[in-house]
Image (spheres, helix red, strand yellow):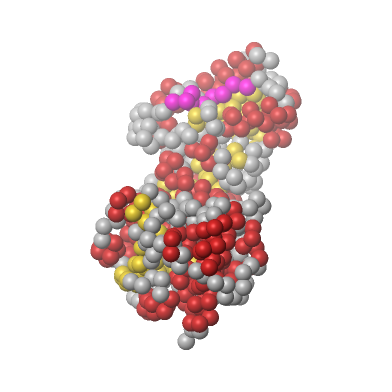
Amino acid sequence: MKKYTDSGKKDTRSGFGDGLTVLGKTHENVVALCADLTGSLKMDAFKENHPERFFQVGIAEANMMGIAAGLTIGGKIPFTGTFANFSTGRVYDQIRQSIAYSGKNVKICASHAGVTLGEDGATHQILEDIGLMKMLPGMTVINTCDYNQTKAATLAIADHDGPVYLRFGRPKVANFTDPDQPFRIGEAVHLQDGTDVTLVATGHLVWEALQAAETLHEQGISAEVINIHTIKPLDNKAIQDSVKKTGCIVTAEEHNFLGGLGESVARVLAESTPTPQEFVATQDTFGESGTPEELMEKYGLNADAIVKAALKVIARK
Amino acid sequence: MPDFNYLTDLVVQVRRDILRQVHKVNSGHPGGSLGCTEFFVALYQVLMERKEGFDMNGVGEDLFFLSNGHISPVFYSVLARSGYFPVEELNTFRLLNSRLQGHPTTHEGLPGIRVASGSLGQGISVSIGAAEAKKLNKDQHLIYTLCGDGELQEGQNWEAIMYAAANTVDNLIVTIDLNGQQIDGATKNVLPLGNLKAKFEAFGWEVLEIEKGNNLEAVVEGMKLAKSKTGKKKPVCVLLHTIMGNGVDFMMHTHDWHGKAPNDEQLEVALSQNPETLGDY
């Protein structure tokens, strides 16, 4: 098995902020907008370095999305920053009409996604955003797993022409991917080769899937682990090729099982390679207050849950 | 001096275009379109500094955004008659595979359209973004926006109105089509807008009124005055008093023709009140 080590816990939102800081220097057309969450989104450095290219819109996310759409007319590449809840559900029609349908080159960067936002509770813990955004025609949907990958993704989406939803989180989590990794939108990353079960994970669940694979290995089960950072467009081939070897699959995500990565994977496999699948995801429920770890445990979003799902799906083969 | 004889002929021809577009497909929004005909003609023929052809980024020219996208018939007619696409294409309004969708969109690549609109309340925000881009590009040109009055019931407008003044977006002229009508009736009965002049002023805007919004010369003069108010640290709002359905007697002063097309007989009467001038498409 390949060994992955945590180089020191870091938050994915800092990966976004540090990526944006780099873009400020390398891409003069990159502009940033924030709805009163500059510190939370780690956008302070960009704001200080480029005050003329930073737009503080206040607590007015609908206006922010519209302004972002308008800024593209004139050749700017706007990055909006707020929590995932306020980046999607709150402004869905603005994104739909002014950005997606209008084909505007806006990068919607969303922090504090999922239950790991923690103590603030369900009002702020969106578990529906992947579904909302992947349903918009032309929208690219990315959910990164650690600091390094989030930084790489932030850099990559600046050079992608078209609207992007970039989802990341609040807590400090294991930082295990290569700091110099190439980030190719729509291309899955193979983390472990295996033959008994495929574990496909996105976001914070990727590290958990690696831990699960180690536990399964100790039990004599060979798990293939795939990091799906891009949920749309999905790397169909990587998933299809893997299940041809393993014959079963577990999807893992910090999102409702309705509308998330799991459903996208299920559709691909149903069309080409019908395969037993288990879904590690929230079960059509809202979140609640608690620490990130407590919530991951309670809602079945950790390595233990992935191991259980793997054993179950292997038995269904 | 603009050639007002020609422009008056154009206004009448645009009215015919509006009526014929909506009649052909028995759908669309003639009322607000007719009420804003003089405004569109003044904007595209006199006020805006425009470049030949169409470039989405629009650097080095004035830009226009239509927030109340349902008045697409007047927008399409004036765009076509200002050279953005062939006038004959008005024949395809609202038909399958047309670039002239029910509400304007960039999605089908129609020249002259820079953002989709139809779901109301989004145009001022988009216009602010385009205005900020102009400032970053050191482009001295202006952003013009048209909103319906009923549309101001959408909350996003007030986010945008607050932002524009606070951030001295002074290369922006937002015109409100004050026809006092919306789908369910008069705005004063559906949800009164209150004193819009006082509201915009309280938000920090420069506000002008054009009382005769269906008088071409008054619109040109009023909009020129508005233009002279740009670049003075405040966004500019023009309250344009119009009559919904203007130019067709049975369509005027009512909300009935907001989203209804005339039948064959009604079209004949309406067209007879607006005899052909520059040639039908």
**The magenta segment:** A277-285
Question: Considering only vertical position in the picture, is A209 above or below A107?
Answer: above
Which of these two is toward me, A291 or B87? B87
Query: Image quarter for residue A273?
Result: top right
Query: Can residue A25 be seen?
Result: no
Q: Nearer the viewer, residue A59 or B259?
A: B259
At a point 37% along the width and 28% down the height, the residue shown is A288
- Residue A190 in percent (x, y) is at 66, 34
- Which residue is nearer to you in this view: B46 or A152? B46
Name the image quarter holding the N terminus of chain A. Answer: top right
Where on the picture, by quarter, is residue B255?
bottom left
Horizontally, residue A135 falls left or right of residue A314, namely: left
Q: Is residue A279 magenta?
A: yes
In percent of width and height, residue A18 lies at 48, 51
Position of residue A156 measured from the top left corner of the image (x, y, whole percent): 59, 51
Q: Quadrant of residue A313?
A: top right
